[in-house]
Image (tube, rainbow, N blue to C red):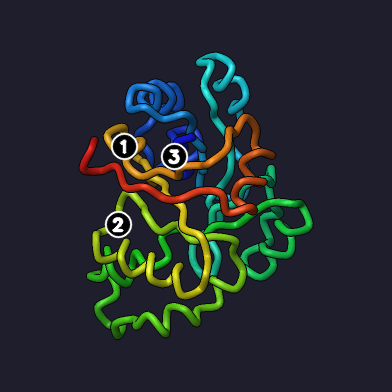
Amino acid sequence: MIIDLHNHTTPGSPDSLIRPWELVTIAKRVGLDGVCITEHGNRKAEGIEELSREYNFLVLGGFEATTELGDILVFGVDSCPSNILRAAELRRFVVEAGGVMIAAHPFRNYISRRAYRLSRDSLSIEQACSLEIFRLVDAIEVVNGWSTEDDVIFTQEVCNRLALKGTGGSDAHLTTQIGSCVTIFENTIRTERDLVAELKGGRFQAADRRSRL
């Protein structure tokens, strides 16, 4: 199954220009089997099940939490308390709830958007592998719709060295980005529980479809 794990829509992400119905109709058009809505914040978007039923298409929910160690995609949890701001605290909460955590675009500001961090020295592979966030997550988003080729190569090497699986997600905020980066799952996914199980089991791989689209 081909699923875009990382998308933002207008109701829950002020920086997105994608309406929920557009996400689904375009996902169908570009050949996806499902999408995840991962709004910024600490809770899943509302109306996901209704949207899925209306369009007879797999739509699952998660959220993109902001922590001191970077952004983290969370699945299998409806929400987390607003006072949980640190990644280690988020990890404890998510594990207890039976969910999973994915480090989202972990090197974006070091590579893809390096201009924002000109005062920082370059990050080596060794330094990257030692970052605390990778001791707290279940997987790493290796292919992101905003990532450069250098970013993807660097992140994949970190995944290889840490023996962590890599996911793909478009991080779509514009309709033209939907389905540009995806995660291909070996088994059929029908529910969020299935998604969590497959992520925990590592039965997936990331794919960059930007040149194809």
Q: Using residue 118 as the reference point, say whether residue 201 is left or right of it.
A: right
In percent of the image, x 69 and y 42: which residue is there? 78
**CA neighbours of label 1 inside 10 A, class few (<14), some (14 to 19), many (20+):** some
Q: Quadrant of the C terminus?
A: top left
Q: Are marks 1 and 3 in contact (CB under 8 Å)?
A: no
Mark 1, residue position: 174
Q: Earlier in the sequence, mark 2 or mark 3?
A: 3
Q: Secondary structure at mark 1?
A: loop
Picture layout, residue 106 above or below residue 193: below
Picture layout, residue 133 above or below residue 126: above
**CA neighbours of label 2 inside 10 A, class few (<14), some (14 to 19), many (20+):** many
Mark 3, residue position: 4
In percent of the image, x 32 and y 47: which residue is there? 208
Could you tell me residue 195's position as x and y percent?
Answer: 61, 41
Q: Amino acid at mark 1?
A: Leu
Q: Amino acid at mark 2?
A: Ser
Q: Earlier in the sequence, mark 1 or mark 3?
A: 3
Could you tell me residue 8's position as x and y percent?
Answer: 44, 40
Could you tell me residue 47's position as x and y percent?
Answer: 60, 26
Q: Secondary structure at mark 2?
A: loop
Circle number at residue 147: 2
Q: Quadrant of residue 177?
A: top left
**CA neighbours of label 3 inside 10 A, class few (<14), some (14 to 19), many (20+):** many
Determine the residue located farthest toward the right in the rendered image.
96
In percent of the image, x 36 and y 27: which residue is there? 31
Q: CA distance from mark 1 to mark 3?
A: 14 Å
